[in-house]
Image (cartoon, rainbow, N blue to C red):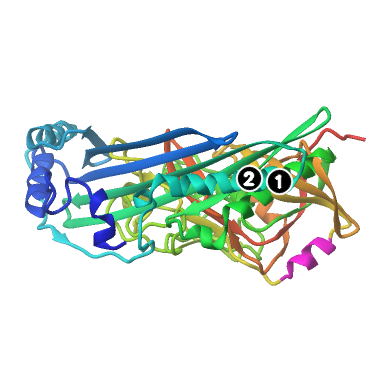
Amino acid sequence: MSEATSRRYRAPFSIGGENEVDPDIARKLLELSLFRGADYADLFFEYRAAGGLSFEEGITRSASRGVSMGMGVRVLKGDASGYAYVEDLSWDSMKRAAETAARIANGARHAHAEKLEPSSLPSRYQISRLSLEVDGVEKRSLLERASEQAMKYDSRVKRVESSFSEEIREILIATSDGVFVTDLQPLMRFGIRVIVEDGTKRESGRSGGGGRTSLAYFERLSPEHHADVAAKQALSLLDAVEAPAGQTEVVLGPGDSGILLHEAIGHGLEADFNRKGTSNYTGQVGKKVASDLCTVVDDPTFVQGRGSINVDDEGRDPEKNVLIENGTLRGYLHDRISSKHFDTRSGNGRREGFSSVPLPRMTNTVLLAGPHEPEEVVTSVKNGIYAKTFGGGQVDIATGDFVFSLTESYLIEGGKLTAPLKGVNLIGNGPETLRQVTMLGNDLEVSDGIWTCGKDGQSVPVGVGCPTIKLQSITVGGTNIS
């Protein structure tokens, strides 16, 4: 992101800003944090500017713009941690936060903060112009175009809701072991919901996308494209039949189906659950946990990916993590605390904002491609279900048991997609599901920038992805039990 483009939205704590925080100021705060005998301390400064628009029935329903700013101080002493945060970046307020967090420790000896050296970062979301800097009329026109396209798609389209959200987040991280780093993280998301009616039948469809990108996104996937996708999905549901219930073969479509991987497997591989012994993957490193076809990675380096980061929220360099390789569990996702426990590197410490503590979190989690043509995967199924788009779900981290609803799915009969289905739920167990993978397509897709992950009350943007997947058997919860 160019300096000129982002200057209007730079944080006041940036070098040269009205509340400038340089390495000397940061080190003084760190020394105060360590004074009572702590082992380690870090500072997390955050400035966020965000906006949003919604459009419905030919008018702008809402428009918003807001900013937030603050600093969090974390102090570690053994296995204990203290945390305090402030929204006022005056010296007195920051000093008070540092002294408050420091109370977790009570000893005569303490570590000293290393000299802070600013470091450079990779550029995984370089853009020429922030969407926040674009006139609101231009963004409104994108929503209007989507609405107009959906309304003319079919006479049964009765209502359209479209929305656009955007933000820029600047963070500054300083740690007592010498890290001093800043990052500017753009994020945008577009969404459309189309409601259709035919007699007494009423259904809806959705589409959307985005990422750490700019309005240039719409040069690749236009508002009209998303309108057509949402309208087509909604119309298909008007003719949907009741889903069969019971054990059956299931083919998961590429891209969005990765949310099942994220929820049912990914969370169980976050190291805090394994450090506490509450994950079904605890103690399983080096053991077979999936089909030989399965290699799962968490990769923060995708260019402009929704879950991509240049630096994690503890100031660590994030790298691609191979979690499962050819069916064998290779490791977990770590923050600073869990990496110390497991004696390995960190890089996946993430937090919602300055008022939150960092936790091991996913970035872009994907199941890598396999050797099969996607058409070959579908034609191999005599009777089954094709899962295209996922809705909500629930997962038990300790057992890996899950229930997911499908918003778009089809019967597979004689190796071909036939009738659309409604009321479909997939019920299973994460590790067991990966063991049921018998074919894997060569068509890996990463979902188009729509997912947000919740954990311990914190939400962060993430990416998911997978190729076409054939599951030999999984329980389908449907309403047709004949």
Q: Is residue 378 shown left or right of residue 115?
A: right
Q: Residue at x 74, y 66 (%)?
A: 374
Where is residue 326 drawn, in percent x and y?
Answer: 60, 66
- Between 273 and 15, the one lying in front of the other is 15
Q: Residues within 10 Å of mark 2 (few under 14, many from 20)?
A: some
> Residue 47 occupies which quadrant of the picture?
top left
Q: State whether residue 459 is above or below residue 10.
A: above
Q: Does any portion of residue 114 appear in the rendered image?
A: yes
| Quadrant (top left/top right/bottom left/bottom right) for the C terminus | top right
| Quadrant (top left/top right/bottom left/bottom right) for the N terminus | bottom left
- Between 481 and 87, the one lying in front of the other is 87
Q: Residues within 10 Å of mark 1 (few under 14, many from 20)?
A: few
What residue is disc 2 on? 148
Give the Cα separation between the discs numbered 1 and 2: 6 Å
Where is residue 150 drawn, in percent x and y?
Answer: 67, 45
- Between 145 and 370, the one lying in front of the other is 145
Can residue 374 be found in the magenta stretch?
A: yes
Residue type highlighted by circle 1: Lys
Q: State whether residue 219 is above or below residue 175.
A: below
> Residue 448 occupies which quadrant of the picture?
bottom right
Residue extending farthest to the bottom is 371
Where is residue 390 drawn, in percent x and y?
Answer: 66, 45
The number of discs equals 2
Query: Majority secondary structure of the magenta segment?
Result: helix
Residue type highlighted by circle 2: Glu
Labelled disc at residue 152: 1
Q: Residue at x 15, y 41 (%)?
A: 38
> Residue 79 occupies which quadrant of the picture?
top left
Q: Residues at badges 1 and 2 in contact (C-beta under 8 Å)?
A: yes
Where disc 2 sits, the SS reads helix
Labelled disc at residue 424: none
Start and end of the magenta stretch? 372-380
